[in-house]
Each structure stands twice: as structure tokens, then as C-alpha cells.
């Protein structure tokens, strides 16, 4: 079994990414590739739904950092949902929770784009 | 505000009843103070969070003394005091104040000479140091009282009681904060280590520069919360961008000219903020791309490039730990990139070795498998390859009438190209031998090679046809090392007739020479691997060496003469060994 699978889905103009497994040094290029694919298609409203994500290393966070300027520069945002405890702790350790909007559920993350527009935090 | 209201409430009710019954005495005030202290103590020991407890404690004290403003200052690591909780401070009041060394827990009143600046700035009337184990850990400050009464000795004793009650909980709070901070730093360290471990495992198994660069850039960006990163490597005097992330293509110059590169690489001994670079074009260039930090890619003293990182998105400055992490990562990256380079060099070497192997196999397959018997003659030949495959070749081709064609050739160059040309010479000779007189044959071969080979390729060839019955040799020397016929009496004839090396000149004329092989005559044909074999003191074996050996051994058979020659050449070159293939052919008339 591979260390990471990433499914994507479009809901109401929002691109959802479902990483499953581990985003680490080994798999980061695959994860980054999926983000880049969305950007290449002009999709700048992105929700990373993390219910299947067991762990994210710095490299994965770096992939988010590397895309965020382009996403917000195009009036979009990248938001996160369904973080498990480990992943939430990693976000908090480094202070990522101050840079990215995090929602308890996928639905809340999707509707956040509708209610509050696409402005970043 | 208090959690333990019932306890305080009982006392308050008792006090209210005493008042209703007309009781009035200084005891009432003391009672009220005691109730406040009880309230304070229960609050301080409650399960509220540290900040809430201190906030509530401040309000209790302000309420009891009817102070219109209050502040709780907590001692920071630096020795100054930082505002932890406050109410009603004037606008512009400092968030941190200097109180110098506080000698005793005595309450300090305004206008007594000490700390006037702090009293003034915060609009306070009284400061109450809170000591724990002879050390000031906090200061409680209060502003004017609502009814205008000044603070005096009575309030001072109450404040000292407050300080005594509050000291331990405040210290606990400070320890808790410190623990939390240490814990946070530890978590970051643990995460860093996880990442370094993860990364080094990945780097050591990676043979792809792009993958290594991506990995290092994304890991650094994630860990330091930076949205842009570029990797510059030294190349041709300047610096070029080997990798960039989070930047638009037009935001970054793909290369930095040599003059600026020298400034940058010279300044980079350790991670350096772009703002700390010497002023000039290099700094402006990087600042324009919104780069904030440079991390050298260094192996020992030599800086081979750097990682440039943008500002942290959080706006926080880079910490020493950040720089250390970045440097560790940069070292690993450089080591991994270097190992990829070495791996590539190794692969290239293997490819060359394989090519050599193939060339050698071609060369070996072209030598004749056996020596055809020639009546009245004794024949021996050998080609001893050096490390690199050269272009030496010899062949015997039986012709009609018992005649035999002999050929020794040396193709220019080495390796696969030389062996392919040699194969072509070999095939042509085999096809043409005997079909026309030797001079015409060599002329045709020259034109064929001119048409089919590259300009700088050529072949030296000695071609001869032996008629054993007539004991006559008709030969053509196309630019080859002159063979010798040594007669039984030791005299030497150099076989020079012929023309230039083949494959060079369009209008080359070849003439044939004829020599008679008397009984006991020995003809030797060699390549320059024999005549140019160098001794350790760089003297050539030469024709003299060849003649000396052949003369000394000419009584022996062809095989023995050949062996003596090879032994003599090896002895001449010594332990350094050969520098070219060694090929020799010996023909003896018996």
C-alpha cells in the first residue's frame, strides 16, 4: 500500500483534496502535485479535508506555504478541515493555525467560502 | 468574580449584621480586609486559568481599597517588569517598566523619591513588591482612591498581606508559563528531529536532484512558515537558480553575475539576513525578490551556493533555532546533491568501461584465429592490448597459388570509434586481397576510407604478399613504422616503399616494394606501441631496441624471436607498464 493517496472532488466551485496516509519527505511531491493541478485549472478555493491524514511533516506544510501566495493573490484561499489530534498539534506547534483557517468539518469549510467570500485570514 | 462565594459570603453577612446593630469600630475595617484576603486566597487557589486568577486578584484588591486603577507587573527574564493585568491605566502607559533592583518587600509610596518615572507614566500612587524567597517576582501598583484619601500605613499592611498571599500562586503561574514555553520549544525540537530523520532517509535514497531540491525547499518553507524559497548554486563564476518555489517566474532573476556572486559567497559564512548584507547590487536584487534570509550551502570552507528564503508569513523574526535548523538542512542537501553528482560520474565511468569492453571484443574478434602454414617460412604474430583499447590490428589472408597476404595496421584514436574503423579496414582487406596488385589495392582502400571516415581519422598500414616458392615479398608501406628485414649476416633493410597513411589524402600514389627473403632472414613488422614504448626515464625503445633484440635472437624460431621482443619491451617500460597496444609480426625464412 502506498504511503499517501490524494483524491480530489469539486463541490460548489470549491476543490476538495482528501489526503489519506502520511504527507512526508517521501510523498510530498505527490501532495504538492495535486495542489498544483488545481491551481493550473484556475481553482483557487481549496479545502484540504484531513480526516484520512495521519501525519504531516514540514515538507507538507511547505507545500501549503509554497502555494498560498498564488492562491490568495488570485482571490482564493486554502482552508483545512477535519484535522486529527496529531495533525492539529503539528499545526499549533509551528503556529500554522494563525495562518490558515481551520474548520471542524468539511461542510463548514465549504460554506465558509460562500458566506465570507474568498478572503484569506 | 469569586468562585468560593459561599465562604466569603458568610463572613460578609456577619459583618453586615454587626453594622446593622450599630456596631462601629476599627475592627470593622479589619474585618472587611480579612474578608477580602479570604476572597483573594480562595480566588488564587481556584481552578481558573493563570491569567484569569491574576486578573480577579487585581480586581479584589482594587475593590477593597477603592482604587480607580491598578496594575499587576510580573518580572520578566530580562529583569524588567511586564504588565500582566491592568485596569484603568492612562493611554500610552508602557507595557513594560524598569524598576531596578528592589531591595525589600516594603510598600513604596509616590513622591518619596523612588521610581517617580513609573508612578508618573502609569498614574500610580503606590507600588507593592511581591517577594518570593527574597526575590521580587511581581509588583502590584494602585492608582488614586475614589474618595481621594491617600494610602497610608494601614493600607500598606493590607497590601503586604495581599503580597504574602499572592506570592506563591504568582510564582506557580510563572513556572507554569515557563513550563509551557519549554514544552512548546521541546515540541518544535521533536518535530524538527522527526523531519530531519524523515528527510535524511529520503535524501540518502534519492538520485534525482530535482527531488532533493524540492524536499529541502518544502521542508524549510513548512518549518519556518515561509512562502518563497530559491536555491542558488555557483556556476561559471556566477550563481544560477537551481530551484525556486512560491515565486512567480518574473519575480526572480535566473542568474546573478560574477561580481555580485563574489560579494554574496564571501559574506556567507553562516545564515545571514539579507538586510545584513553589504549594501550594493546583490542585496538590492535579493530584496527586490522579497528574500529575507540566506543560508549557505557549504562543504567545509567552500560555499557552493545558498538557499534564499522570504520573510516569515507570521511576521515573526527568524530565531537562532530556525537558523540552526536551516543550516543543518542545507548541509544535508548539499551532501545529497554531491552524492548524486558522484553517482552520475560513476555511471559515466561504467558506460565508458562497457564501451571499452565492446571495443575490445570487436578488436579480438578480428585477429586471425590461426596461423596458416607457409612452406619454408615460420610465422608468428601477437597483439598485446594496453588498458585502453587502441586500434592495432594484424591479419593473414591466404591467397591462391600458396601465397599469403600479411597486414599490420594501426588505426588512429581509441575505443569504440577506432575499433569500428578497424573492422572496416579488416573487412575491406579480406574482400580485396589478391584481387589486384598490392599498390592498386592499397590505393583503392585509401579512397574507400577517405569516403567513409571522418576527416581526422586515418590508418597506417603495412600490406605484403608473400610468394613462398619465389621467396619474394611484394609490399606497400602506407605510413606505417618501417618494418625491417634482417638478413642472416645481421644487415638491416628498412621496407619503406609505399605512400602516406590511408584516409588522409585524395591524390595519394602508392608504389610497391619488393624484397627477397633469403634463408635465415627475419622480417619484423611492429606498431608504434613497440618503437615508442617509453622507459621510466622517458627514452623510447626505438628501432635500435628492436634491431638489438632481433639480431640477438635471429637464430631462434619466429615464435621465440617474438617472445624475446615482447619481454624486451616490457623490461624497457618497467613497472609503469604500457601506454599503447603492442603489436608485432615476425616472418622467418627457414
Image (spheres, coloured by chain):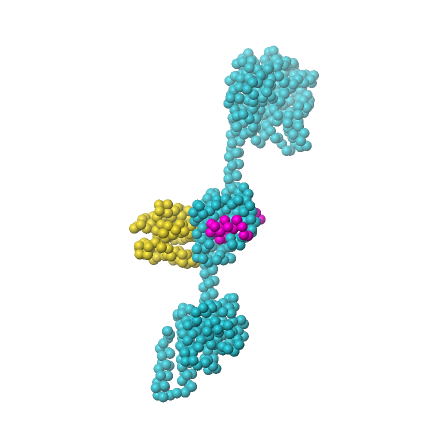
Q: Residue at x 40, y 72 (%)?
A: B56
Residue A58 shows in the view: no
Where residue B479 sits: x, y (%)? 60, 21
Q: Which is more toward the observer, B57 or B517?
A: B57
Figure check: A75 above or below B122: above
From the viewer's perspective, tell me whether residue B515 is left or right of residue A78: right
Q: Which residue is drawn at 47% across and 50% down?
A: B288
Please report the bounds of the magenta region as a residue range: B278-303
The chain drawn cyan is chain what? B
Q: Which is more toward the observer, B503 or B283?
A: B283
Asked if residue A12 is among those painted magenta in the image, a careful observer would answer no
Where residue B304 sits: x, y (%)? 54, 46
- Name the residue furthest bottom: B22
Q: Residue at x 33, y 55 (%)?
A: A117
Figure check: B427 above or below B63: above
Figure check: B526 above or below A15: above
The chain drawn yellow is chain what? A
Amino acid at each position: 500500500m502506498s504511503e499517501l493517496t490524494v483524491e480530489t472532488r469539486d463541490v460548489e466551485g470549491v476543490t476538495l483534496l482528501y489526503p489519506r496516509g502520511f504527507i512526508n519527505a517521501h510523498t510530498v511531491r505527490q501532495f504538492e502535485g495535486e495542489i498544483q493541478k488545481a491551481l493550473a485549472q484556475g481553482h483557487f478555493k481549496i479545502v484540504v479535508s484531513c480526516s484520512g491524514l495521519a501525519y504531516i511533516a514540514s515538507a507538507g506544510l511547505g507545500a501549503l506555504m509554497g502555494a498560498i501566495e498564488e492562491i490568495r493573490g488570485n482571490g482564493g484561499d486554502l482552508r483545512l478541515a477535519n484535522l486529527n489530534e496529531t495533525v492539529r498539534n503539528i499545526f499549533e506547534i509551528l503556529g500554522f493555525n494563525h495562518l490558515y483557517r481551520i474548520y471542524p468539518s468539511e461542510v463548514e469549510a465549504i460554506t465558509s467560502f460562500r458566506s465570507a467570500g474568498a478572503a484569506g485570514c | 468574580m469569586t468562585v468560593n462565594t459561599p465562604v466569603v459570603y458568610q463572613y460578609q453577612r456577619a459583618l453586615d449584621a454587626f453594622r446593622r446593630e450599630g456596631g462601629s469600630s476599627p475592627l470593622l475595617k479589619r474585618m472587611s480586609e480579612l474578608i477580602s484576603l479570604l476572597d483573594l486566597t480562595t480566588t488564587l487557589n481556584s481552578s481558573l486559568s493563570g491569567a484569569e486568577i491574576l486578573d480577579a486578584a487585581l480586581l479584589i484588591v482594587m475593590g477593597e481599597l477603592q482604587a480607580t486603577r491598578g496594575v499587576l507587573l510580573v518580572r520578566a527574564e530580562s529583569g524588567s517588569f511586564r504588565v500582566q493585568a491592568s485596569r484603568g491605566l492612562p493611554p500610552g502607559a508602557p507595557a513594560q517598566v524598569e524598576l531596578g533592583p528592589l531591595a525589600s518587600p516594603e510598600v513604596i509610596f509616590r513622591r518619596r523619591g523612588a521610581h517617580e518615572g513609573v508612578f508618573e507614566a502609569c498614574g500610580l500612587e503606590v507600588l507593592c513588591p511581591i517577594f518570593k524567597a527574597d526575590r521580587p517576582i511581581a509588583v502590584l501598583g494602585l492608582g488614586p482612591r475614589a474618595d481621594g484619601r491617600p494610602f497610608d500605613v494601614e493600607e500598606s499592611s493590607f497590601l503586604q498581606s495581599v503580597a504574602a498571599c499572592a506570592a506563591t500562586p504568582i510564582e506557580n503561574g510563572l513556572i507554569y508559563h515557563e513550563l509551557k514555553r519549554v514544552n512548546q520549544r521541546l515540541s518544535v525540537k521533536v518535530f524538527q528531529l522527526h523531519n530531519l530523520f524523515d528527510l535524511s532517509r529520503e535524501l540518502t535514497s534519492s538520485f534525482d536532484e530535482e527531488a532533493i531540491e524540492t524536499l529541502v525547499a518544502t521542508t524549510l518553507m513548512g518549518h519556518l512558515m515561509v512562502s518563497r524559497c530559491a536555491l542558488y548554486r555557483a556556476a561559471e563564476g556566477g550563481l544560477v537558480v537551481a530551484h525556486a518555489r512560491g515565486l512567480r517566474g518574473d519575480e526572480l532573476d535566473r542568474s546573478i553575475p560574477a561580481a555580485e556572486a563574489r560579494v554574496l559567497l564571501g559574506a556567507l559564512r553562516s545564515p545571514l539576513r539579507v538586510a545584513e548584507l553589504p549594501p550594493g547590487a546583490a542585496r538590492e536584487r535579493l530584496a527586490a525578490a522579497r528574500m529575507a534570509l540566506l543560508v549557505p550551502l557549504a562543504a567545509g570552507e567552500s560555499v557552493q551556493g545558498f538557499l534564499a528564503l522570504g520573510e516569515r508569513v507570521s511576521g515573526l523574526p527568524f530565531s537562532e533555532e530556525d537558523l540552526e535548523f536551516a543550516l543543518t538542512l542545507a548541509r544535508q542537501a548539499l551532501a545529497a546533491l554531491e552524492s548524486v553528482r558522484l553517482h552520475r560520474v560513476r555511471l559515466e565511468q561504467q558506460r565508458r568501461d562497457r564501451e571499452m569492453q565492446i571495443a575490445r571484443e570487436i578488436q579480438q574478434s578480428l585477429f586471425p584465429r590461426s596461423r596458416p602454414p607457409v612452406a619454408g617460412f615460420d610465422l608468428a604474430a601477437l597483439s598485446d592490448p594496453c588498458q585502453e583499447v587502441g586500434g592495432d590490428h594484424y591479419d593473414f589472408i591466404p591467397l591462391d597459388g600458396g601465397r599469403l597476404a600479411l597486414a599490420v595496421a594501426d588505426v588512429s584514436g581509441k575505443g569504440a570509434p577506432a575499433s569500428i574503423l578497424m573492422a572496416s579496414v579488416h573487412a575491406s582487406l579480406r574482400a580485396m586481397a589478391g584481387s589486384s596488385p598490392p599498390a592498386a589495392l592499397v590505393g583503392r582502400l585509401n579512397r574507400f576510407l577517405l569516403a567513409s571516415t571522418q576527416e581526422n581519422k586515418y590508418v597506417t598500414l603495412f600490406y605484403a604478399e608473400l610468394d613462398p616458392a619465389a621467396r619474394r615479398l611484394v609490399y606497400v608501406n602506407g605510413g606505417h613504422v618501417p618494418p625491417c628485414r634482417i638478413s642472416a649476416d645481421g644487415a638491416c633493410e628498412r621496407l619503406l616503399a609505399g605512400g602516406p597513411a590511408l584516409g588522409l589524402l585524395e591524390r595519394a600514389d602508392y608504389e610497391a616494394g619488393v624484397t627477397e627473403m633469403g634463408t635465415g632472414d627475419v622480417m619484423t613488422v611492429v606498431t608504434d606501441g613497440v618503437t615508442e614504448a617509453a622507459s621510466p626515464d622517458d627514452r623510447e625503445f626505438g628501432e635500435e631496441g628492436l634491431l638489438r633484440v632481433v639480431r640477438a635472437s635471429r637464430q631462434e624460431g619466429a615464435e621465440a624471436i617474438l617472445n624475446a621482443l615482447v619481454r624486451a619491451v616490457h623490461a624497457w617500460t618497467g613497472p609503469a607498464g604500457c601506454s599503447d597496444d603492442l603489436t608485432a609480426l615476425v616472418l622467418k625464412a627457414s
